[in-house]
Amino acid sequence: MDVRLTRILKIGVGLCVLMAIIVATLAGLAARRTWERSKAPDMPVYGNLPNFSLMERSGRTVQLSDLSHHVVVFDFIYTSCPGPCPMMSSRMRRLQGELKEDSPVRFVSVTVDPETDTREVLQKYADTFGADPTRWLFLTGSRDQIKSLATDGMHLALEVDAGAKTPSGQGPIVHSTRFVLVDGQGRLRGYYDSDDDDSMKQFVVDIRRVEREDPD
């Protein structure tokens, strides 16, 4: 047989073997991902978030439908909070930095002191924490709207002590310091303690799990 032809045949056989190895490797990786997915327990669904209509610091109205198809991280804060709120916002800033800019995750902070936290105040607070206005929203509205979203919608604690006034004229506010994870279908998927490092590590894992879920 011609030497040149023999060489060509050997190259052809080598390429076929290489392609077979590549295909087998890819198939194995796909099978492993499927197996790992099947081994991981399904994340719970705690209910559906009802629709809401609140105002963003930019002045635009934001409803639940505006966040559809986005994984959303919610928290409730107020800008004059002397305790946990700055820590929560720092945690949120860290999450914003850990997730890529093209991530479908959105961050939403809702003030529980709408009388004090005007749009201008929220804008200044957002700037302090480097909030990307396209990814991290700050919402305000009437006190009744906010309380309904927190307590009825997300099952979080929110109470205002009207009897004891602070220098700003507002009674002390007791509110949840947990982050809430909502999927692209508006379903409540998890609650995470903002002051617990292990809970926050699990939070990042669960955000990415919800990101990977196929929509129904």
Image (spheres, rainbow, N blue to C red):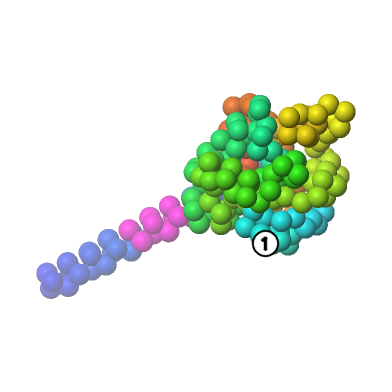
Element type where label 1 sits in the image: loop
Residue plotted at (81% across, 50% down): 142
Residue plotted at (80% across, 29% down): 165
Q: Classify residue 99 as left or right of residue 25.
A: right
Nearest the viewer among 52 and 28 is 52
Q: Classify residue 99 as left or right of residue 68.
A: left
In the current view of this chain or complex, which residue is farthest to the left? 3
Q: Which residues are magenta?
A: 18-28
Q: Is residue 93 visible?
A: yes
Residue 1 higher or lower than 112, as above or below: below
Please identify the quarter of the rendering in which residue 161 is found.
Answer: top right
Q: Quadrant of the C terminus?
A: bottom right
Tell me where residue 153 appears, x and y as whole percent. Answer: 82, 47
Residue 20 higher or lower than 44, as above or below: below
Q: Classify residue 5 as left or right of residue 139.
A: left
Asked if residue 26 is among those painted magenta in the image, a careful observer would answer yes
Q: Dot 1, crowdedness within 10 Å: few (<14), some or many (≥20)?
A: few
Residue plotted at (49% across, 53% down): 101
Q: Is residue 189 visible?
A: no
Which residue is disc 1 drawn over? 60
Nearest the viewer among 48 and 33 is 48
- Predominant secondary structure, magenta span: helix
Residue plotted at (22% across, 64% down): 10
Tell me where residue 16 appears, x and y as whole percent. Answer: 33, 63
Residue 29 higher or lower than 15, as above or below: above
Residue 58 higher or lower than 176, as above or below: below
Q: Quadrant of the N terminus?
A: bottom left
Tell me where residue 108 appears, x and y as whole percent. Answer: 66, 48
Asked if residue 85 is among those painted magenta in the image, a careful observer would answer no
Disc 1 residue type? Arg
Number of residue marks: 1
